[in-house]
Image: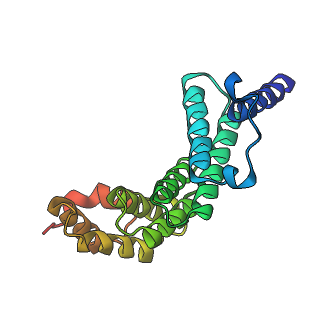
Amino acid sequence: MKYTIFKVVLLTFVLLLTSCASDGSKKNQTPLSKSQKSSPQYLREKIKTMEDSMAKFNASNVSTAAYNLSQLELINRLEEYYKTYPKDTFSANCLFKMHMLYSGMNAHVKSVAYGDSLLKAFPNNANRFLLLESMISSCDMFITPRDTAAMRRYCQMLLLDKNYSEFKKQEIRNRLKFISLPLMDYAAKRNDFKMQ
């Protein structure tokens, strides 16, 4: 147990060092001003550094606790960018990544909340279809009690989008007919239903 705690602390310390470290050529430079530290470029670099660190974590056998800490740090950096530059198009990427990270952490209520923020701020974002499908799944399978009102709202958004595939629209129409059934029950009985 002590070894595991030591390992988590050590990995967290290493993570902090790697995310804050700079190369040798920058050591003699003047420290960044407050405005430079909040510039879009600087904040994007902080996000990229954290994402690169997490990619290295994925390639190694890092403890779940250390990985979860790195996910939270990435979320903090993404949120900092979004709150500092809410109208910037990169903020749409930040919101989408926060949605996906929280979903991966099984924090589906937060995941859907960030998805809603993305839809409100950037209604035509590049990940719109994937986002809405993800939010429908979260409301159907992972949020208790099931939020069928939200599911219906997200399904309607997809049905109204002229660029969404007609095949998928038909699947959504069929799902809406039996929205009272949880997804697993719907899937099990789907062949028994008369689909139109």
Left or right: where 139 falls relative to 6: left
Nearer the observer, 168 or 53: 53
- Identified at 56% across, 32% down, the residue is 52
* Residue 136 locus on image (x, y percent): 40, 64
Seen from the viewer's position, the closer of residues 26 and 153 is 26
Of 43 and 15, which appears nearest the observer? 43
- Asked if residue 174 lies left or right of residue 63, the reply is left
Q: Residue furthest right?
A: 2
Using the rendered view, name the quadrant where residue 57 is placed.
top right
The image shows residue 62, relative to residue 70, as above or below, that is above
Q: Residue at x 59, y 44 (%)?
A: 47
Whether residue 180 appears in this view of the structure is no
In the displayed structure, does residue 11 sit left or right of residue 131? right
- In this rendering, the answer to whether 174 lies above or below 20 is below
Name the colouring of the figure.
rainbow
Residue at the limit of the structure toward the left, as seen here = 196
Residue 105 picture location, percent across and down: 58, 48
Specify whether residue 35 is in view. yes
Total numbered labels placed on residues in the image: 0
Q: Depth check: give the residue in front, 155 or 128.
A: 128
Q: Position of residue 124 (x, y in %)?
A: 34, 66
User: What residue is rendered at 60% in x and 56% in y?
Assistant: 81
Q: Quarter holding the C terminus?
A: bottom left
Residue plotted at (48% across, 55% down): 90
Relative to 184, say whether 21 is above or below: above
Where in the figure is residue 64, as x and y percent of width and height?
A: 66, 34
The quarter of the rendered structure image containing the N terminus is: top right
